[in-house]
Image: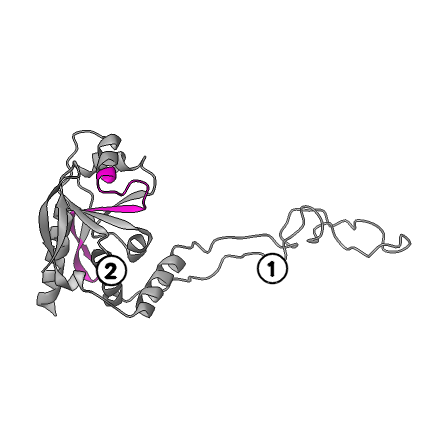
């Protein structure tokens, strides 16, 4: 199996830790990643922007001036778009549902490939599970500085707890934040270009934006466990 460097909260190298080869060596067609990211960006849009046409604005229907005798172009209404407060021509209107479906297996393959690319580029560091007794931005800033990530766009991934929810398609597991993460989130939110995600909820767009990734030890264990489960089900 491939290995990653492991660090403690002070940023000191404490050894190596294994990561599944199915993640470290994962590669997919670039078009698949492009389609996945495009779908994420498209689905983030609300499609609710709306402007009023000349028939919808609240305005007088009085003619701006008489039709003839002034040597001016004829005008029919103050609601016309060339007047202040008039309607908008060809402005955005609410659209029908523009949701782009994402194939689950393609999504998972794209995420593995993006994470594998970070692993091969030495852009992933594993940190012992972070348990802060209180929010400490300075502690996290020192960790980033020790890892050489100060000022770099960094994504911190931690493991969540799972609850089972019964739906139309059966029972599925949903990742929920753990209480110990509240202090970690508060410690990271004042650090620029640093984001926090649960490893099960991180999207390919999060991985693509991040220059570097910090995995907690339990998050890496969750990734390895998920890949082993996928391998058994193939």
Asked where in the image residue 130 lies, by quadrant, the reply is top left
Q: Is 137 or 3 nearer to us in this picture? A: 3
Which residues are drawn in magenta?
144-173
Specify the label residue 117 is tagged with: 2
Q: Residue furthest right?
A: 69
In the displayed structure, 75 sits above or below 137; it is: below
Q: Earlier in the sequence, mark 1 or mark 2?
A: 1
For image coordinates 85% across by 52% down, the residue present is 66
Residue 139 pos. (x, y %): 22, 32
Locate the C terminus and report the quarter of the image it occupies. bottom left
Q: Considering the numbered disc 1 on the image, is that residue within a helix, a strand or a loop?
A: loop
Whether 219 is among the magenta residues is no
Disc 2, SS: helix
Residue 96 shows up from this direction: yes
Q: Position of residue 87 (x, y in %)?
A: 65, 52
Spot occupied by residue 205 in the image (x, y as percentages of width and height): 32, 55
Q: What residue sits right under mark 1 in the picture?
A: 90
């Amino acid at each position: 199996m491939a290995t990653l460097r492991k660090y403690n909260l002070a940023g000191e190298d404490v050894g190596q830790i294994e990561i599944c080869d199915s993640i470290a060596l994962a590669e997919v067609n670039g078009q698949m990643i492009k389609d996945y990211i495009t779908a994420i960006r498209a689905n983030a849009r609300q499609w609710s922007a709306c402007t009023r046409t000349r028939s919808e604005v609240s305005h007088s229907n009085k003619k701006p001036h008489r039709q003839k005798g002034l040597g001016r172009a004829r005008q029919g209404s103050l609601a016309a778009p060339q007047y202040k407060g008039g309607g908008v021509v060809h402005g955005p209107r609410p659209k029908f549902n523009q949701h782009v479906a994402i194939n689950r297996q393609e999504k998972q393959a794209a995420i593995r490939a993006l994470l594998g690319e970070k692993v091969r580029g030495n852009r992933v560091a594993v940190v012992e599970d972070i348990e802060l007794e209180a929010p400490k931005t300075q502690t996290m800033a020192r960790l980033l500085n020790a890892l050489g990530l100060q000022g770099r766009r960094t994504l911190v991934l931690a493991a969540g707890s799972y609850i089972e929810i019964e739906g139309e398609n059966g029972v599925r597991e949903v990742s929920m934040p753990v209480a110990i993460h509240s202090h970690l989130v508060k410690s990271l939110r004042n650090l620029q270009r640093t984001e926090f995600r649960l490893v099960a909820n991180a999207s390919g767009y999060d991985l693509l934006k991040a220059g570097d990734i910090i995995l907690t030890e339990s998050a890496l264990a969750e990734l390895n466990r998920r890949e082993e489960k996928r391998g058994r089900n193939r």
